[in-house]
Amino acid sequence: MDYLLTEEQIMVRDLARKIAQEKLKPIVAEYDREEKFCWPVIKLLAEADLFGVYIEEKYGGMGGGILDLCLVTEELSRVCGGVAVSYAASALGTDPIILFGSEAQKKKYLPDIASGKKLAAFGLTEPNAGSDAGAIETTARREGDYYILNGLKHFITNGGEAEIYTVVAMTDKSKGQRGSSAFIVEKGTKGFTFGKKEEKLGIRSSTTSELVFQDCKVHKDNLLGKEGMGFIITMKTFDMSRPGVAAQALGIAQGAFDLALEYSRQRVQFGKPICSNQGVKFMLADMATEIEAARGLVYGVARMIDSGNTKVSKESAMAKMYASDVAMRVSTDAVQIYGGYGYMREYPVEKFMRDAKITQIYEGTNQIQREIIANNLIKESLANSKK
Amino acid sequence: MNIVVCIKQVPDTTNVRINPETNTLIREGVQSIVNPFDMYAIEEALRLRERFQGKVTVITMGPPQAEAALREAISLGADEAILLSDRAFGGSDTLATSYALASGIKKIGQVDVIICGKQAIDGDTAQVGPGISVWLDIPQVTFVKKIEDVEEKKGTKYFRLERMTEEGHEVVEAPLPCLLTVVKEINEPRIPSLKGMMRSKKAEIIKWTAADVDADPKKVGLDGSPTQVVRIFSPTPRQGGQVLTGEAAELAAKLCELLKGAL
């Protein structure tokens, strides 16, 4: 399918593909097995200016948009969902600054993120606050020019590796969701440390850690927007970042499919390649069609965001939900086509199945996405019936 | 340090096939790339510039579409690119090609070092680099795997270089200006940056004809080429080997018979 990408977007995609295929592919198994953060490739992405594709030129970026970010994420993901999420999670940590940062905050933080000198991360999830983002327990108490942060964030992608964190904490617990605020906290700030590093099923070349705040003093200049805007910042950030997770899922599906197609042509049973069996053919056709449908949805919503449309919750949720469900189905079928070999760690395809699962869970489980989609549908329907 | 890198645009030989009837390369649908060995030359030039400052100029001789190879070099960080392109250069062998490139380099002016890949993957001759040094009458050091340092002795600068030979490694010194051909062990070529690619899109490629570089018409193109390609063919695939089975003594005797027969 031709998505009529611009010359710059093709350049971005091809450069990401080159790094993924030439530099990432040879080391992917090692980093997955040993659960190491893939700094060598992250550094190459930085040198190639790929961390800045979606950041404005005046802050050191390339001036592209979310579609550019999606293209890079997809290409990385075709090889390794772990590296892809390390890349995309830096954008997730950056989105609140792009959306709600003051000019001074943007000038201070965006150039280093755009150049890839510093990674960013987003700190929202807590042990008792997953989908229920209003239930967060981390507090930020105002004291003079500072906020004092106390609490624990967990499951934070890029935790420990990133330098810049956007963290959501309660400034007024009595107001519930409306009492949370978002802060920029730099690594090395006194009272800010890292806890347990998680061991994971998939995306093992990415780091997932706890953030620990113990009387951590953060200057009021690091408050994003105003007090009480934490929830809205989170929601708007996710609207913008979900296409990134969707692109990660899309890449995983494509990567698994590429392997399955190739294998089905080479694997001979009963004297002929297994791809000549109708059972396998139908699987391949369904997989490819679902991937293409997911791609249309992901690129479509990315373009919507890039055109300046801010009401994208429903479409963003659809893209994330659909692409990740496709990733899970396609990667499972890819293992099926590989048969017994597919189940073995020695072959590359099982990793895609392990990597796919998380895309149905994070940045809102797919059940939460369906909630968002349905709530928007009902809201729209109500609004239409009042006219 | 003024550094010149000579590059060549070649068909990506990983997918090259030969038409068995005409014995010529099938060029349709084959992607053109920068000769992989030249990528190491470009990288080493950029590293030399990082160490000693200066300027990296890339030069190639080829048809107008060879411009793409020069733009790739610029996207990696080269400062300037020159395309020697003229119908008069058509059909040049390695002698005529090295003459044309040497003429272009003369026009560039003051040059401290010329770097080439050890050979091109299409012709595999490894003659053009050394040829240029002969036309320019400067020293050549081939198969360089490391540029150790630059030393100054009695007012002359010398490169200290490590060469790769079949027998082992050789450390040699060569006064500047000189010509180096490099092997792939010398470095790991970088990936271009987006900013570099944007710059290369807009960059102006300098184009010189045979007349622009004062080339003697008798020394370029077919007239300047004493060698001619008579025929290109795919070698017949090697036949499969023979596996002998049986008792050791019996096998040894059988093997000796076979070897005798082959002599």
Image: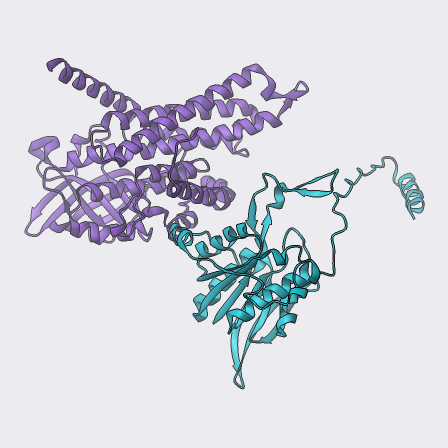
Q: Residue at x 11, y 47 (%)?
A: A147
Q: Quadrant of residue A381?
A: top left
Q: How is the image coloured?
A: by chain
Q: Residue at x 62, y 60 (%)?
A: B118
Position in image of residue B67 (x %, y %): 51, 53
Q: Nearer the viewer, residue A347 or A277?
A: A277
Question: Quick check: A192 left or right of B246?
Answer: left
Q: Nearer the viewer, residue A330 or A376?
A: A376
Position in image of residue A108 (x %, y %): 21, 54
The answer to whether B188 is drawn above or below residue A24 in the figure is: below
Q: Nearer the viewer, residue A7 or A72?
A: A7
Question: Quick check: B17 left or right of A345?
Answer: right
The chain coloured purple in the image: A
Color of chain B here? cyan
Q: Nearer the viewer, residue B91 or A312?
A: B91
Position in image of residue A299 (x %, y %): 34, 31
Q: Quadrant of residue A180?
A: top left
